[in-house]
Image (spheres, rainbow, N blue to C red):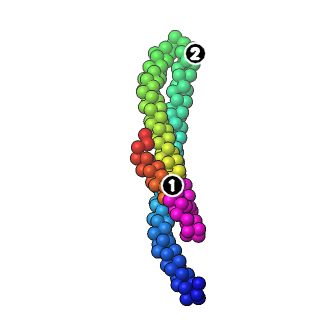
Amino acid sequence: MEPTEISEFREQMKEAGESGSIGVSLAISVLAVLVAMITVLGHRSHTQAVLCQARASDQWNLYQAKKIRQQSVALNSDILTLLATPADASAVAAKLADYKSHSAKWDADLQQEADQGRQLEEQTEHAERRADRFDLSEALLQIGVVLSSITLLTRRRSFWITGMILGVAGLICAASVFFVH
């Protein structure tokens, strides 16, 4: 080959490489934007899970406080019953009736508090499942970005195709969040 042919060949190779890399670069940019969006959604899901867990913990603390109050009243009722003398029987009976009405009210309250606590725990688990899906999606998209980037260095389309497949898998995983129960 003559020097002019070599330089023309070099120019052609350079142009061919650049035109192929534009599509790859664009795909990498799109994947990077998707990674950023999925990352934000994942962080929000984790934050929601933490907040739901805090509310559930507060709810169970309220349940426990009411349960302790109820047991304290039951204990006081037992003590009054055992220590009652005939002279103050009417006062003891009135106090026992008051304690029993409080205890009956707290029975209903405790059931309601327990139900709310369980519901908040379910919300926490749901948010954690969503966050897990977003984390997996983020990882798949990031791997897709890296593999697609390798294409720019090696000029092998197999890396780009694999990166795109992982990117699509990441998007499917992110979309599956809406089907999590």
Q: Residue at x 47, y 42 (%)?
A: 126
Q: Amino acid at mark 2?
A: Leu
Query: Residues under labels 1 and 2: Cα distance?
Result: 76 Å
Secondary structure beneath label 1: helix
Residue type pointed to by label 1: Leu
Quadrant of the frame with the N terminus: bottom right
Asked whether 35 or 122 is in front, the reply is: 35
Residue 74, given in percent of the width and then of the height, sits at: 53, 22
| Camera-side residue of 155 and 93 | 155
109 lies above or below 27: above
Q: Which mark is residue 83?
A: 2
Q: Quadrant of the C terminus?
A: top left
Task: Give the vertical position of 72 relative to 3 (above or below).
Answer: above
* Residue drawn at 53 percent across, 41 percent down: 57
**Tally of marks:** 2
Q: Secondary structure at mark 2?
A: helix
Quarter of the figure with residue 81:
top right
- Across and down, in percent, residue 39 comes to 50, 58
Residue annotated with mark 1 = 166
Task: Verify whether residue 51 appears in magenta.
Answer: no
Residue at position x 52%, y 84% in the image: 8
Q: Is residue 159 shown in magenta?
A: yes
Crowdedness near tag 1: few (<14), some (14–19) or many (≥20) residues, C-alpha within 10 Å: many
Q: Is residue 29 visible?
A: no
Tell me the chief SS of the magenta region.
helix
Residue 163, position in %: x, y? 52, 59
Within 10 Å of disc 2 (Cα), the crowding (few <14, some 14-19, many 20+) is: few
Residue range corresponding to the magenta coloring:
139-162
Q: Earlier in the sequence, mark 1 or mark 2?
A: 2
Residue lying at the far left of the rendered structure: 178
At 52% across and 11% down in the image, what residue appears?
86
